[in-house]
Image (tube, grey):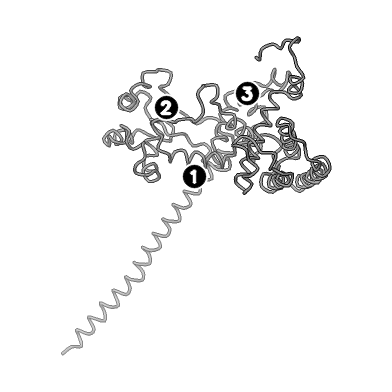
Amino acid sequence: MPPRRKRSTTTIEDAKNNTRTDSTKKRYTTQIRTIVQWAMAHGHSQGVLDRNTLNLATFSFGNFTKFLEWCYQTKHMAASTLGSYRSAIVFLYEKQGVTIPQAFQDELPHIMKGYSRFIAADIEEGVQTTKSKRPLTIEEMKRLTSRSVALADAVGVALDGVDRLPNVATHSIRKGAVTFASSGCTSGPSTGVFTTRAGCSLGDVLDRYIHFVPAGGQYTGRIVSGLPESSAAIGTLPPHFGARDDPVVTDALRVVLPTLSNAACLSTVLRMCLASVVYHMEWLVDTFPQHHTLFSTVLFRNKDLLHQLAPNVTINDGNIRRTGIPPHVHLYTQLEVMRNELQSTRDELQTARSELHNVHVHGKVDIILAELQSMRTASTP
């Protein structure tokens, strides 16, 4: 908490600085930084003082309206977000002690009203508009993870600018998962299930009667992990070792992860991670560059160890079983079985037809040729 203000020493400058909360000032600073990045990227660097603020002596009203135009065309922002950028630059004028141009009072309100009407019309026509924090979509998550695994940082990951553990969080992933589970698929879990799983507050009555139950959380996990909800593949198990207490796996963990393997609380997680790497070994080799750090680890340098572990990895029922599978998936499974049986029957009929063709057609031809040959021999003097 900030130090308590002393009434006897409060000045006019303190009163001026107290017109906005600290959180609002922080948000304005972030938005000004966004305007700076836009100015640098679109040839308006003369209006930039440094990477964090603008030079309002040269950054004109026309530059700001161009920025608003770019936001509307490319960012699909809500009207309130555009208005917040206006408030941010007005705050910067006050902070730098620069007189606010008259156009901000005469023209800008009309421009903002016009954009508000445009955005309202877009919403009526079904155009997606970001009214709050933009969630991390499943497509973006796949793209980011694909780029991440291609980096040579398999041994350790460095987070630039992060020197304290509380600064590391999963806010976007968590909020994006809720958005995807609620409206990103056609057969997602109920509202009560994914909100309790995400730890969201639902109010006194809902918090009292709607609680976390494993079945709902298990289904939510399958949806959020990106498994296809309209296919039998949604019931797929993750790669795992078939035997729970396999000495080969235990010895491999000691070799591959000598320090972490001593932590009993991580045993299950480490086994699942190792099984997944072994199961996707061919894909990793084909996808990653040859100089990737992953291939210099003990697991990939010891080919004999890989070959010993590979037969023990499965995605079928073993020491774990499928959970969180909705009833309709069983119908998908039965349809898949019927499809495979029909395909097998078709192949068998095709084989039988070919054999009958050889017997009845080619067989007759051989008999005729033999008779003609005998007739030719008999007629030869």
- Dot 3 lies on which element? loop
Q: Position of residue 172 (x, y in %)?
A: 59, 32
Rendered location of residue 375, percent (x, y): 24, 84
Q: Quadrant of residue 30?
A: top right
3D distance between C-alphas at marks 3 and 2: 30 Å
Please give the residue where the numbered disc 2 appears in the rendered image: 319
- Could you tell me which quadrant the C terminus lies in? bottom left
Cα–Cα span, label 1 and label 2: 24 Å
The amino acid on which the numbered mark 2 sits, given as a three-letter code, is Asn
Q: Quadrant of the N terminus?
A: top right
Q: Is residue 315 left or right of residue 189?
A: left
Residue at the spot x=33%, y=71% of the render? 362
Pick the front one: 366 or 85: 85
Q: How many marks?
A: 3
x, y percentage for residue 66?
Answer: 71, 47
Amino acid type, mark 1? Val
Q: Of the residues under marks 3 and 1, which one precedes in the sequence?
A: 3
| Residue lying furthest left | 381
Element carrying mark 1: helix
| Residue identified by numbered label 3 | 199
Camera-side residue of 107 and 241: 107
Secondary structure category for the residue under label 2: loop
Horizontal side of 246 relative to 82 (left or right) equals: left
- Which residue lies under the disc numbered 1? 337
Q: Position of residue 35 (x, y in %)?
A: 65, 40
Label 3 crowd (10 A; few <14 / some 14-19 / many >=20): few
Report which quarter residue 181 is drawn in: top right
Above or below for 350 versus 117? below
